[in-house]
Image (cartoon, grey):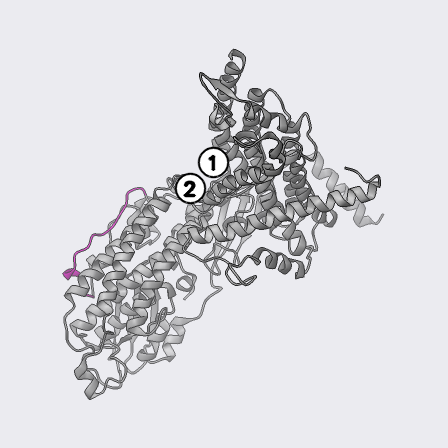
Amino acid sequence: MTSGFFWLDTFVKVAIALGFMLGLALPVIYAELKIMAHMQNRVGPYYAGGRWGWAQPIADGLKFVQKEDLVPADADAPVFKTAPYVVIMATIAIFVVIPLGPDLVARDLDLGAFYLLAISSIGTLGVLMAGWSSANKYSLMGGLRAAAQLIAYELPLLLAVLAVVVQAGTMSLTGIVEAQSAAITIGPISVSLPFILTGQIISFVIFVIAMVAELSRIPFDMPIAESELTMGYLTEYSSVRFSMFFLAEYASLIALSMVVATLFLGGYFVPLVPEAWLNLVGPMVVLGKAALIVFFVLWIRSTFPRLREDQLQNLAWRWLIPISLVNILVISFFAVAI
Amino acid sequence: MTDRDIAMRHRSEVAVSVELETPGMTLNIGPQHPSTHGVLRLIANVDGERIISVQPVIGYMHRGYEKLSEVRTYVQITTLVNRIDWVAGFASEVPYIVAVERLMGVEPPERAQWIRLILSELARIASHLVFMSSYPLELGAITPLFHALRDRERVLELIEGVTGGRFHPNFNRVGGVKPAAGAGKQQRGVSQDIPAGWFAQTQSTMERIFGMCDDLDTLVVGNELFKARTVGVGIIPADRAIEYGLSGPNLRASGVPYDLRKVEPHLPYPEVEFNVISAESGDCHDRYVVRLNEIREAAKIVLQAVDKIPSGPLVAKVPRLIKVPKGQTYVRGENPKGEFGYYIISEGGQKPYRMKIRSTSFSNLSILPWILEGQLIPDLVAVMGSLDFVLGDVDR
C-alpha cells in the first residue's frame, strides 16, 4: 500500500501512528480517572464534555498546551528538551510489531519478541536523560531510580517472554498467535487454547509484575514517588513536554497490555470465528483483551502502596528470576518431550 | 585563556588524580514538599538514598500564640487555642479552659463536662482519621484517603451540629460550654443546648466509624505491601520514646501504656469504660494500628457518653467580667496527638501574665534527627508521617 511518493507515504504513516497512539491513550486516561474514582467512592470527572466528563483527558491536554514551556536555567537544555521525544518514540515503536489481525501488523519481524524487549527499554534512557539534565536533585534521584529499576525488572521480563518463545517455537509475534490458535486434540475434543491456559501461567504472572515495574506504576512508581521525590524525573517538566511523558506513560500501558494479550491471551484469535473474519474483528479482540490487563493494572494502583527500590530488587532477584529460570526449564522439557 | 581558567583546569586535574571521594549530598526537603505536612523543612545530608543526618528547621508557621495570649483576655484566648492543632480544634481548647477554671475555682456543671468529653472524643476521631488517610497516601496508597475522609466528614458534621464550627469550634466558656443561641430567660427553659436528633445521629455515625475501621483493617493494616513498608521501620524503643518526651499514640505504640485520660482526668473519663491501646515494637506499623484502635475506643466512649449524659445547666455561675486571681497552674490533657498542656501564670486581672503552651507535636518531632539517621529516603517519609504531627502544633 504505497503511493509511490516517499514523503506522502511517510506523512500518512506518521499521522496514522500518532492518531492510533492518541486514540488509545486518551481512553485509557479517561478509564483511569473514572475507574479509580468509582473504586474510591468518588464520581470522577463529570462536567467536561457535557456528559460523564468524557472530554476530561482532552481538556487536561489542552491545559498543558497553554502552559509555559519552562527549561530551568541550570538545565542541560538540549538533553532536557530531547528526553520526552526519546520516551514517546520508544512507546510508539512497540506498536510496530503487535499484530491486530493475521494481516494487520505494521511489520511482522522475525525477531519480533526480541525487538519488542529491546525497544521498550529505550524509554528508560529518556527517563535517565530527563533526570540527569533537569539540574534538580529530586529529578536526578528519580532518573537513577528508574535506571536501577531497569536492572530489576528487565531480566524477569525477558525470561518470561523466552518461555513463551520456547513454547511457540518462533519469535515472530504473529507466529506466537498462530501457535496459540493451533488446535490441541485431546481424545474427541479439539480446542485452541491461549498460552496462559497451556502452561504459561507462571510466565504470565511474572510478565505482568515486571510490566508494572517497567511502566513505573504503583506499587513500583519509585522513579516518580510523589510523596518522596515530589515528582521524580518529571519535577521540572511543564507544558507539552510534560504531557508527552504523560501520554507516553498511558500509551505504553496500553501497548504492553496488548503485548500481554498477544503473548499469553491468544492475541487477535478468538475461537469460532472464521479465519477470513479475523482481520475484521482482530483489532477489537486484541484491544478487548488488553483492556482486561489495563483494568487489572488500575485496580492494583488503587489497592497498594509503593514499595521501596531495594524491595523491588529483592523481589526480582530472589524470587522472579529463579522462578522464571525454573519455569523455562520445565517448559523446555515439555517442548522437547511432546 | 585567562588565569582563572587555567587555575580551574589545574584544579580539576588535581581532583581527578586523587582518589575519587563521594561526599554526601545536601538534600533540602521542604518547606514546600508534599509530605512535610505543611511547612516543615528538613536539611538532609544523604549518601545516595541513605540519610547520614537530618536537621529539622521549624518556625515557618510561628504565629506567636504565647505572646498573643498575653495581650488578650481569658475569653478571647479560646479563639487562639483551637487554632494550634487545627485537626483536633476542640481537644486543645479543653485543657486551657480547665486551667482557667482551676485558677478561678469554678467547677463546670456536669452536663457541660460530658459535652466536652463527647466533643473531645469526636475531635480525636477526626484527628486520627486525617492520619488514617494521609499516612497511606505518603506510602503511595491513594484509596484509604477517600474512605477515611468520607467518614471524617460525618464526624465534622456532628461537631458542627453542636458548635457551629467544623475546625475551630470555639465552644468552651469559662465555667462550661456555650449556651444555645439566644439563651434568654425563655430559651433557658427549653434547654436547647444540643440540636434535636443529634444523639441519634451520633450513634449512627459511630456505627459507620466502626465499619470504616474494619475496612481500613483489610485495606491497609492487612495489606502485604503496607506491611513491607512499615513493619520494622522506624523502631522507637520505649526508653528512647520517654527520653525524647514522646506522648500519645507514639509513646503507646512503643509499649508504654500511658494515657492522661486514665492518669489525671479532668473530664468524667473514670465513669466510662475504655482500654488504653498500646503495642509492643514501636515501629511505623504499630503506630498506625494503635491509632486505628484508638478510633474504635473513642467511638465506644462516645456511645457510652451519649447514654450517660445527665441533664442540667450548661454554664456555672461565673461573674460577667472574667477576672482570674493571682496564681499559677499547669493543666494537661490527652490530645489526639498526645500530652497537651497549658501553664498559666496569673498576676490577677483579665489577662494572663504568661502562658506557656506545651504542644504535643513539638515534642514528638524532636525525635526526628535521631530516628532518621541511617534510614533510606522512602523510609524518611514513612517514619515522619507515622509520627503524626501538625505544623501549627509544632510552631504555635
Instruction: Name the residue type under label 2.
Output: Arg
Q: Is residue B269 magenta?
A: yes
Residue B294 is situated, as x and y percent measured from the top left of the image, at: 27, 53
Q: Residues within 10 Å of mark 2 (few under 14, many from 20)?
A: many
Q: Chain of mark 2?
A: B
For this orientation, the residue located farthest to the bottom is B185
Q: Disc 1, disc 2: CB below 8 Å?
A: yes
Residue at x-position 39% and y-position 51%: B144
Part of the protein shown in magenta:
B267-281
Residue B306 is situated, as x and y percent measured from the top left of the image, at: 19, 65
Judging by the rendered image, the residue that carries numbered circle 2 is B229
Q: Quadrant of the C terminus of chain B?
A: bottom left
* Residue in the foreground of this view, choosing between B169 and A249: A249
Whether residue B158 sits left or right of residue B53 in the image: it is left
* Residue in the foreground of this view, choosing between B256 and B11: B256
Q: Chain of mark 1?
A: A
Instruction: Name the residue type under label 1.
Output: Gln
Q: Which mark is residue B328?
A: none
Residue A256 is situated, as x and y percent measured from the top left of the image, at: 58, 37
* Residue in the foreground of this view, choosing between A269 and B30: A269
Residue at x-position 73% and y-position 50%: A77
The image quadrant of residue A257 is: top right
